[in-house]
Amino acid sequence: MTIPVLTFFNNKGGVGKTSLVYHLAWILSQTGHRVLTCDLDPQANLSAAFLDEDELEALWKEDNGSQGKTVFKCVNPLLKVGDLLPPVLQEITSTLKLIPGDMRLSGFEDKLSREWPEALGKDPYRPFRILTSFWTVMQKGAEDLDATVILADVGPNLGAINRSALIATDYVIVPLGADLFSLQGLRNLGPTLKSWCGEWQERQEKWKPPEFELPEGRMKPLGYIVQQHSVRLSRPVKAYDKWVNRMPKEYADNLLNRKSGPFPASPQEDENCLATVKHYRSLIPMGQESRKPIFDLTAADGAIGSHATATQDARRDFQALAKLITDRAGLIPTLPGTPAPLSS
Ligand SMILES: Nc1ncnc2c1ncn2[C@@H]1O[C@H](COP(=O)(O)OP(=O)(O)O)[C@@H](O)[C@H]1O
Ligand SMILES: [Mg+2]
């Protein structure tokens, strides 16, 4: 059995992908899920949210043996003649683990580009091994943790690393900012996912039976998430509405191929909108400083007065979003939920 992979994707940067993966990973791991997160962005921001700089430096060292301590170290032997290394997971808690990212992963981009056409050639074994390496590494990690779900964070582009991340993906969630760039991103994203999906099916069809297990490459869009924080403060509400109210149509048209309306007039009325994530303001730097999700911040971390109330609101928001996502993806928790820590 393979473990479902959820990827948060938009080729626009700064729309809160990494923050969402981080917070959802935490909340799911506190509500009965066993969560594996994988940092497939060479910028490694997700890893930096979970681990401090000394820990990261130790993981990135060249000479810490031939172990799969980062995603790049797992796939690196494929750049020569070797095979994948199994991942060495970083334990965040007993129900939350990380396959750390690595800035050197960008060196894998060219290799993945070259192997894509080769997978249609006469000797597809190695091309398939390379193109599916992220999926294989994530599934091996999920097996170790007995994970119920895998959350992947990716960079903001439509390159070969992300194509491999997406063929490893069962469900895609699209975070959007309230601006032209996010809408334009949807127009690129939809057709790109469609073509990656089709091209992956074509490759799978040609290699039958495959000599090892392959991902399905479903890439099913689960919905979009509107991020309020990406709105510039000086911008009037009218400008915000102008962009967000175009999201229902643009999402349905580009991601679901639904060309004709009527479309909902706003994200609030749209079942494809999973949530509108608030601007959490100073809680965000507080969480980064304490290396904690914002809903676990306590008085000792500086969350006092209205901040303390805001942490509890944030917990409710993320619990609701997690419930919607798990329901739609059919994910079933295996453990009783861990009670939320009390704020002191
Ligand atoms: N809900 C939020 N409220 C306030 N700031 C946020 C929120 N979500 C993300 N941010 C901040 O916005 C910036 C971009 O977020 P990030 O998650 O790194 O986006 P991406 O991964 O899409 O580039 C970061 O500085 C992050 O701390
Ligand atoms: Mg990011």
Image (tube, helix red, strand yellow):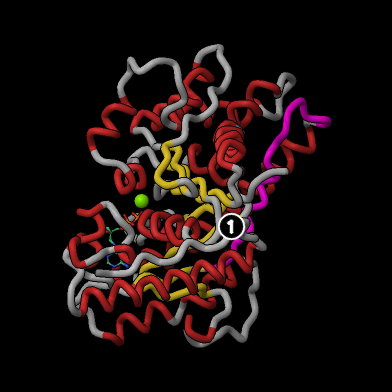
Q: Residue at x 56, y 74 (%)?
A: 272
Q: Position of residue 306 (x, y in %)?
A: 20, 79
Question: Is 343 in front, or is 66?
Answer: 343
Q: Is residue 297 magenta?
A: no
Q: Residue at x 25, y 40 (%)?
A: 52
Q: Residue furthest top?
A: 81
Tell me which secondary structure the magenta stretch mostly adopts.
Answer: loop
Q: Position of residue 120 (x, y in %)?
A: 70, 29
Does residue 303 appear left or right of residue 117 in this picture? left
Q: Position of residue 150 (x, y in %)?
A: 55, 48
Q: Where is mark 1, residue-wise?
A: 335
Say which element carries label 1: loop
Question: Is 312 in front, or is 185?
Answer: 312
Q: Residue at x 24, y 65 (%)?
A: 298
Q: Image quarter for residue 270?
A: bottom right
Q: Specify the amino acid type for callout 1.
A: Leu
Q: Does 28 appear above or below 309?
A: above
Question: Is 344 in front, or is 327?
Answer: 344
Does residue 120 appear left or right of residue 238 in this picture? right
Q: Image quarter for residue 239?
A: bottom left
Per the rendered image, the range of residues in magenta is 208-223
Q: Does 241 appear above or below 199?
A: below
Report whether residue 178 is seen. Answer: no
Image quarter where the N terminus lies is top right
Report whether residue 23 is seen. Answer: yes
Does any atom of ligand 1 lie closer than 8 Å to the CB of label 1?
A: no
Q: Does 304 appear above or below 26?
A: below
Image quarter where the C terminus lies is bottom left
Tell me if mark 1 has few (under 14), some (14-19) or many (20+) residues whose alpha carbon lies within 10 angstroms of its own: some
Q: Residue at x 42, y 31 (%)?
A: 70
Q: Does 167 appear above or below 211?
A: below
